[in-house]
């Protein structure tokens, strides 16, 4: 089922999300709905707060990049209770966008590698170093679980530049090619 994407200004995006309980019976359905929603909006990552659920759950679909980046062919993963354990020393800057902040794209500096632990839908535990585009997407999505959005990471000057756009989104003056929910 395709769900509406919650946009900037809705309080769920600013909340610290709850751990997914071990016996969470909705998990499979919710993950499927998140993959459907992500595919429809042509995004690469989606965190549960973005569909209005304050849970530590992320889905990533990098298959859409496979034409340019063959190593991502078929890459679709759900991350239950992901936790970034370590950051690599190198950083780079990359243009980010967010389905919850339609029309805003800004360069964000982040570490190029992270060590991340998570469970998959079957409960299997993982703990791996990841790098490159995947590391960036996971950092962006894990920020959502802590009530952060990527514009929080901009310089004071760039923050000032996007302020009006953020205000417009939070007032519901926004449109997107996918279904959204606004606070007005
Ligand atoms: Ni986002």
Image: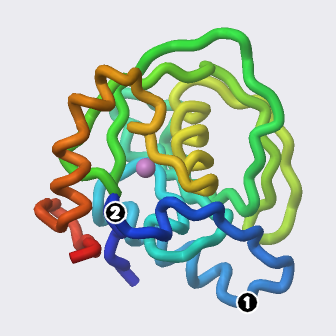
Mark 2 or 1: the one toward you: 2
The count of marks equals 2
Q: Residue at x 59, y 59 (%)?
A: 58
For the N terminus, give its image quadrant. Answer: bottom left
Callout 2: SS: loop
User: Marks 2/1: CA distance?
Assistant: 29 Å
Tell me if 164 is positioned left or right of 106 in this view: left
Is disc 1 surrounded by few (<14), some (14 to 19) or many (20+) residues within 10 Å?
few
- Look at the picture and state if 141 lies above or below 47: above
73 or 150: nearer the viewer: 150
Q: Residue at x 64, y 80 (%)?
A: 28
For the C terminus, give its image quadrant. Answer: bottom left
Disc 2, disc 1: CB below 8 Å? no
Tell me if 3 is positioned left or right of 174 in this view: right
Q: Earlier in the sequence, mark 2 or mark 1?
A: 2
Tell me if 137 is positioned left or right of 160 in this view: right
Is disc 2 surrounded by few (<14), some (14 to 19) or many (20+) residues within 10 Å?
many
Residue 4 position in % (x across, y down): 32, 76
| Quadrant of residue 135 within the rendered picture | top right
Residue 32 position in % (x across, y down): 53, 75
Q: Residue at x 81, y 78 (%)?
A: 21
Q: Residue furthest bottom?
A: 25
23 or 35: nearer the viewer: 23
Labelled disc at residue 8: none
Q: Residue furthest top?
A: 90
Residue beneath disc 2: 9
Residue beneath disc 1: 25
- Look at the picture and state if 104 lies above or below 53: above
Q: Residue at x 44, y 72 (%)?
A: 51
- Look at the picture and state if 118 lies above or below 48: above
């Amino acid at each position: 089922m395709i769900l509406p994407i919650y946009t900037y200004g809705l309080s769920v995006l600013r909340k610290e999300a709850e751990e997914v309980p071990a016996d969470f019976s909705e998990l499979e359905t919710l993950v499927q709905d998140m993959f459907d929603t992500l595919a429809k909006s042509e995004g690469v990552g989606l965190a549960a707060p973005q569909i209005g659920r304050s849970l530590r759950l992320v889905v990533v679909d990098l298959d859409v990049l496979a034409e340019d980046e063959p190593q991502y062919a078929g890459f679709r993963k759900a991350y239950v209770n992901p936790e970034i354990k370590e950051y690599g020393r190198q950083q780079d800057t990359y243009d980010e966008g967010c389905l919850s902040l339609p029309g805003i794209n800004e360069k964000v500096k982040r570490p190029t590698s992270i060590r991340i632990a998570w469970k998959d839908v079957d409960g299997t535990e993982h703990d791996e170093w990841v790098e490159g585009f995947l590391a960036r997407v996971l950092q962006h999505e894990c920020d959502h679980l802590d009530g952060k959005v990527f514009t929080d990471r901009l310089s004071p000057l760039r923050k000032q530049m996007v302020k009006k756009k953020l205000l417009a989104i939070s007032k519901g003056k926004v449109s997107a090619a996918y279904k959204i929910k606004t606070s007005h």
